[in-house]
C-alpha cells in the first residue's frame, strides 16, 4: 500500500516547516499528510487553495525544486484566507497546530482562571518595577 509521502510531494513537509518553523504544526516532526490531503493524493480545501497559488501557469507536475521555490509565496498568498470556513484563518490554524483544511479541527483557546490572571498581572507589575 502506498503511503502519503509516495503519493504526494516527499519534499512538502520539510518545505512547509521551513516556512513555519515555529508553528505547532511543525513541532515534533513533519506535519501530517492531512494538512493538505483528505486521502492522498486527493487534496482537502486547504491543499486545493494552496495548489491554486502554487506557481500558477507552470506545467505540472512541478519538479521538487520548483515546488520548494514556489511554496513560500503560495502559503503567504492564502494565510489570511479560511480554507475550511471555520472562522479561523489558515495561518492561525497553522501556528496553533490545527488543520486549516478541516472545519472540525480548530485551535483550542485556553482561558485563564482568575488566579492565573491575577498572577500574570502581578508578574507584569514586578517586571515594570525592575
Image (tube, grey):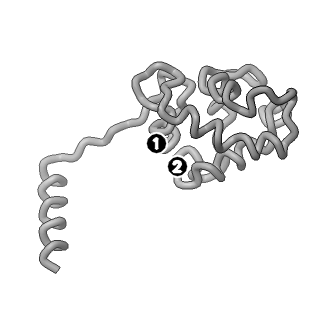
In the picture shown, does residue 68 fall above or below 53?
A: below
Q: Position of residue 83 (x, y in %)?
A: 53, 23
Q: Which mark is residue 118?
A: none
Can I make out residue 2 in this image? Answer: no
Quadrant housing the C terminus = bottom left
Q: Quadrant of residue 35?
A: top right
Tell me the residue that label 2 is attached to.
23
- Is residue 68 positioned above or below 7 on the image? below
Q: Farthest residue in the bottom direction?
A: 130
| Mark 2 Cα shell of 10 Å, populated few (<14), some (14-19), many (≥20) | some
Give the spatial CA distance, label 1 vs label 2: 7 Å
Marks 1 & 2, CB-CB < 8 Å contact: yes
Of the two numbered discs 1 and 2 on the same chain, state the one appearing first in sequence: 2
Secondary structure found at label 2: loop
Q: Nearer the viewer, residue 130 or 79?
A: 79
* Apparent side of residue 66 relative to residue 128 in the rendered image (left or right): right
Residue shown at 53%/30% (left/top)?
100
Foreground of the two, 109 or 87: 87
Quadrant location of the N terminus? Answer: top right
- Residue 40 appears at what percent x and percent y? 76, 25
Answer left or right for 78 relative to 2: left
Residue at mark 1: 96
Residue at image coords 78%, 40%:
67
Q: Nearer the viewer, residue 72 or 105?
A: 72
Q: Position of residue 101 (x, y in %)?
A: 57, 25
> With respect to residue 39, does 12 lie above or below?
below
Amino acid at each position: 500500500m502506498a503511503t502519503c509521502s509516495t503519493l504526494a510531494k516527499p519534499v512538502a513537509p520539510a518545505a512547509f516547516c521551513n516556512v513555519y518553523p515555529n508553528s505547532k504544526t511543525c513541532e515534533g516532526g513533519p506535519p501530517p499528510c492531512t494538512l493538505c490531503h483528505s486521502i492522498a493524493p486527493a487534496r482537502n480545501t486547504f491543499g486545493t487553495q494552496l495548489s491554486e497559488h502554487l506557481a500558477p501557469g507552470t506545467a505540472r507536475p512541478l519538479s521538487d525544486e520548483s515546488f520548494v521555490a514556489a511554496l513560500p509565496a503560495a502559503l503567504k498568498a492564502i494565510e489570511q484566507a479560511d480554507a475550511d470556513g471555520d472562522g479561523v484563518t489558515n495561518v492561525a490554524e497553522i501556528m496553533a497546530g490545527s488543520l486549516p483544511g478541516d472545519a472540525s479541527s480548530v485551535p483550542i483557546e485556553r482561558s485563564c482562571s482568575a488566579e492565573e490572571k491575577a498572577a500574570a498581572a502581578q508578574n507584569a507589575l514586578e517586571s515594570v518595577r525592575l
